[in-house]
Amino acid sequence: MPVPTFHGVYPILATPFDDDERLDEASLRRMLAFMLRIGVDGVTVLGVLGEANRMSDREREAVVRIARETLGEAIPLIVGVSHPGTRATVELAEMAARCGASALMVAPTAEPVPSEARIAEYYARVCEGVGLPVVLQDHPASTGVHMSVPLLARIVADNARVACIKAEAVPSASRIGALRTALSAPGSREVPMLTGLGALYGQFDLERGSSGYNTGFAFPEVLQAHLAAFRSGEAALARRIWRHFLPLIVFEQQPGVGVRKEILRRRGLLSSARVRHPGAAMASADAGQLTALIDFVMPQVDITRPLDVAAVMERASS
């Protein structure tokens, strides 16, 4: 399987369902093909906003198999395998590996009595039981688990399988800076860190040491352009790109996955914006606001096609 470098843009994909909440294989394949077309560095399935916690193990397996079959050997596939039980996490990881995963994304689970030692033990057992690189997801908003910088550095140092940190604890930029310092200390080990949170703090995170994006923003071409400008030293251009699309980033980052799924539907990638119950779709009253926002940010642009970010910005400014 292709091995991820954890540098670049790794979109997290929404899981498509039809209007009866059944897995929509055709939409999943269409979305994966689009990611190949625009040249992302890899993709992630079954993340927090991939609604994995509302899916059966059989459905999870189907998503991983379809993803690898569609991607072939072209790009790495990261699979979320988080579960409240350690053994169940390892078993999900084994399934993902059998089905063609390149790496695993693992988040901790809140316990009645918080314990950093228990979190460290959880990652140690998971890393001992798997044979793929692990992305350590630090997203307290969804997990309810707040991991200190020393704890994260300890987990990285003690577990060679941990190959990346998905840095989503806020304030993310200062956390990334603190982690950079901690991971470069004697006895520790440096690993890449990827930005999540819908790219909401992307510019700030890159400035403090993020190696790219691992998030589900519905226009990954924007993140590719932003990262390319930043990497090439075009600081002013990077800031302009991020600033131009920031209203859309903010709007999409509302709680839940409903807005993102609706945008993906409008892009022609999903047949339905259905969110599995008890999750909620975007309110119909918000549809006009979304339309106006897209028209403002990308006037007269066909969003069903890959975006030419420079052309979009030029059109908007004319």
Image (cartoon, grey):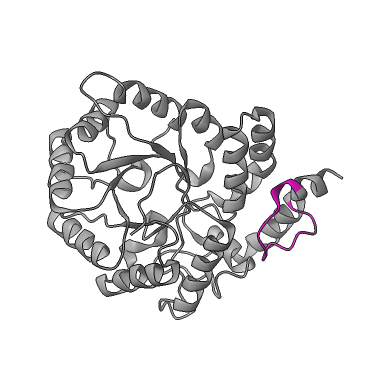
132 left or right, relative to 230: left
**Screen quadrant of the N terminus:** bottom left
Residue at (43, 25) in percent of width and height: 174
Which picture quadrant has residue 52? bottom left
Which picture quadrant has residue 290? bottom right
The image position of residue 293, as x and y in percent, is 71, 52
Residue at (31, 30) in percent of width and height: 190
300 left or right, relative to 244: right
The image position of residue 315, as x and y in percent, is 82, 49
Residue ranking furthest to the top: 186
Q: Nearer the viewer, residue 145 or 105?
A: 105
Q: Nearer the viewer, residue 256 or 229?
A: 229
Compared to residue 87, the image places residue 313 above or below, namely above
Which picture quadrant has residue 66? bottom left
> Is residue 309 part of the magenta span, yes or no?
yes
Residue ranking furthest to the right: 318
Residue segment shown in magenta? 298-310
236 left or right, relative to 117: right
> Is residue 5 part of the magenta span, yes or no?
no
Residue at (26, 41) in percent of width and height: 162
